[in-house]
Image (cartoon, helix red, strand yellow):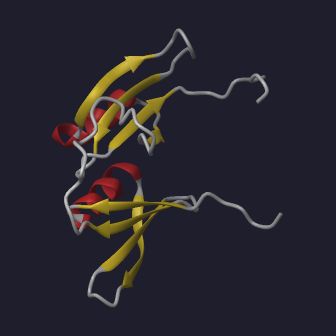
């Protein structure tokens, strides 16, 4: 098998500039490319620092047919949330200040993984973003 890298998630945004600023300011993304489309719109690619991962930002052309997600994301089939690991959930929340639109938590999951702590916030478009500290892989997870 040749090259295989998880490379991007595409987001349709009410205000792509606000979304770009949010992910750039709090999660280390930086504008990598702007693709002009024939209809005058554009796709903005923002790349997460020190990775090969991008968010691809599109301008919304219609309203959402479903209510905005709450808590830790939608319960129906689909993408539930984007997630980022940080050194300190409380530190990240302090950094974000009033821009941290908390939808759930912070919660401690010490019963499952000692030191695991998570909060969920909404991005400018209402997408749920999980911010976690202390998650570690299991040494010997049960087989598939």
Residue 29 vs residue 14: left or right?
A: right
**Is 44 above or below relative to 108?**
below
Residue sitting at x 28%, y 38%: 69
**Which quadrant holds residue 94?**
top left
Q: Residue at x 26, y 87 (%)?
A: 40
Of 66 and 40, nearer the camera is 66
Q: Which residue reaches farthest bottom?
A: 38
Q: Is residue 60 left or right of residue 135?
A: left
Horizontal arrangement in the rendering, residue 58 relative to residue 134 (left or right)? left
Quarter of the picture holding the C terminus: top right
Above or below, 113 relative to 129: above
The relative height of residue 43 versus residue 47 in the rendered view (above or below) is below
How far from the left and from the top, in percent, is residue 107?
37, 18
In x, y percent, where is residue 34?
A: 38, 80
* Residue pictured at 20% horizontal, 38% vertical: 97
Q: Locate residue 98, reporting x and y percent.
A: 16, 39
Question: Please, which residue is most extreme toward the left here?
Answer: 98
């Amino acid at each position: 098998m040749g090259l295989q890298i998880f490379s991007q998630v595409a987001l349709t945004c009410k205000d792509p500039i606000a979304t770009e600023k949010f992910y750039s300011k709090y999660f280390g993304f930086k504008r990598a490319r702007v693709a002009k489309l024939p209809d005058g719109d554009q796709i903005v690619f923002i790349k997460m620092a020190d990775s090969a991962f991008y968010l691809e930002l599109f301008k919304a052309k219609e309203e959402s047919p479903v209510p905005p997600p709450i808590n830790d994301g939608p319960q129906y089939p689909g993408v539930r949330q984007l997630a980022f690991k940080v050194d300190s959930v409380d530190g990240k929340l302090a950094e974000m200040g009033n821009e941290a639109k908390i939808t759930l938590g912070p919660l401690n999951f010490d019963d499952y993984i000692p030191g695991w702590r998570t909060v969920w916030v909404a991005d400018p478009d209402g997408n749920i973003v999980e911010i976690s500290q202390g998650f570690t892989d299991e040494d010997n997870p049960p087989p598939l």
